[in-house]
Image (cartoon, grey):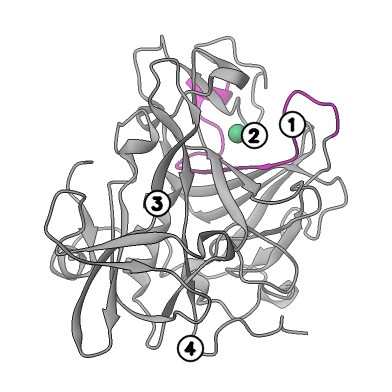
Amino acid sequence: MPSPHLSRRRLLHGLAGVGVAVAGWQPRNAAQIVPSAPSIPTTFTAPIGWAGQVPGDGFRIGHGFACENTWFNRGWWHTGEDWYAVDRDTGDAVIYAVAAGEVVYVGFDYPGRVIIVRHADDLFSAYGHLNFATAVRQGQAVAAGDTLGSVLLQVRRRAPSHLHFELRTFLTTPLVNGDRPSHGVKCGTNCPPGPGYWPITAPEHPTAMGWRNPTHQQVKMALEQGIPDGIKVRPQSAAMGRTVALHAEPDGGSTVRKHLTLGPDDAFALRDLSAGDPGSTGTSAEAYGYWLRIALGDEVGGWVQAAIPSDRETGSDGRPSSIDRPFLLVSAEGNAAPRP
Ligand SMILES: [Zn+2]
């Protein structure tokens, strides 16, 4: 399992003196905020969803962070997460800002548009392969859950329609996408979107260049902002009928307290979150560590694995590159209609 996990407990004890990237950020242009995703505790917003549904419901990560993907780009680590719909083409899925910030880039053809949002001077989110008609423009302030655009329908292209999603510490940085790129990456000089991949043969892991494991980074941000009361953990539609283990600790090796088969009426109270280091240097889906501690009535409850490695896609060494996300975090009202 990955190196030391963050959890609410540890974070509360460890935050003093640590720069909090997002919590203190103030939008510069707050008057232009557009409608948000439905009913979601905004600190947990997935970057993609179907209109009117909980973001993340019906989606999986086909190609994870710092994983190789042999059918698409053998020999390269992925610098983000590719999100796909589970049961249909991903074209026209809605893209949401994962945290408050300012849109600092709209442009390029990835294929499709790329949008980059600055959350703090050292944290940016990037969303690629979007339709050319975007919902935001450069300079606009956004809140977590605000609509940014939608996924470009890609037919007979090299890859099917999907979202390429990155969290990283730079807009441009000299060796990646600035004035002295150190590898033959496609985006070119001073191109903010960047290459999307980093050579396996490079001496540095993508995290050394400033990319972050998006799932781990999002959990870290949520813990820094505090878990709102009344958050429920619900199985996503694609996970119905799946049996999951409740562990005593957030890892795969601890005691299994019981097994649960997920059903449509399940809604567990969220007690805690845990994730691996956003800068962890793993190189397969097995490096993902994202766990939720849920309550079960009067019982003790336990930790469930919320990012499950899958070998739907693999690296050339056979290790898994895909991740299933069986759980959604929703506010107490559940899956309400979108705000008008
Ligand atoms: Zn990608």
Classify mark 2: residues with Cα within 10 Å, few (<14), some (14-19) or many (20+): many
> In terms of sequence position, does the residue under pointer 4 or pointer 3 come before the other?
3
Q: Badges 4 and 3: C-beta atoms under 8 Å apart?
A: no
Element on which disc 4 rests: loop
Residue under numbered circle 1 = 110
Residue ID at (61%, 65%):
55
Rounded to the nearest whole Å, what is the CA distance between mark 1 and mark 3? Answer: 27 Å
Image spot of residue 303 (x, y percent): 25, 65
The stretch in magenta equals 155-180
- The answer to whether residue 185 is left or right of residue 105 is left
Element on which disc 2 rests: loop
> In terms of sequence position, does the residue under pointer 2 or pointer 1 come before the other?
1
Residue ID at (60%, 54%):
59
Mark 2 C-beta to ligand 1 under 8 Å? no
| Along the line of sight, the residue nearer the viewer: 217 or 76 | 76
Q: Badges 2 and 1: C-beta atoms under 8 Å apart?
A: yes
Q: Nearer the viewer's eye, disc 2 or disc 1?
A: 1
Whether residue 166 is in magenta: the answer is yes
Residue under numbered circle 2 = 193
Rounded to the nearest whole Å, what is the CA distance between mark 2 and mark 4? Answer: 37 Å
Q: Main secondary structure of the magenta part?
A: loop
Q: Badges 4 and 1: C-beta atoms under 8 Å apart?
A: no
Image spot of residue 168 (x, y percent): 47, 42
Q: Quadrant of residue 257?
A: bottom left
Residue under numbered circle 3 = 307
Amino acid type, label 2: Pro
> In terms of sequence position, does the residue under pointer 4 or pointer 1 come before the other?
1
The circle drawn on residue 332 is: 4
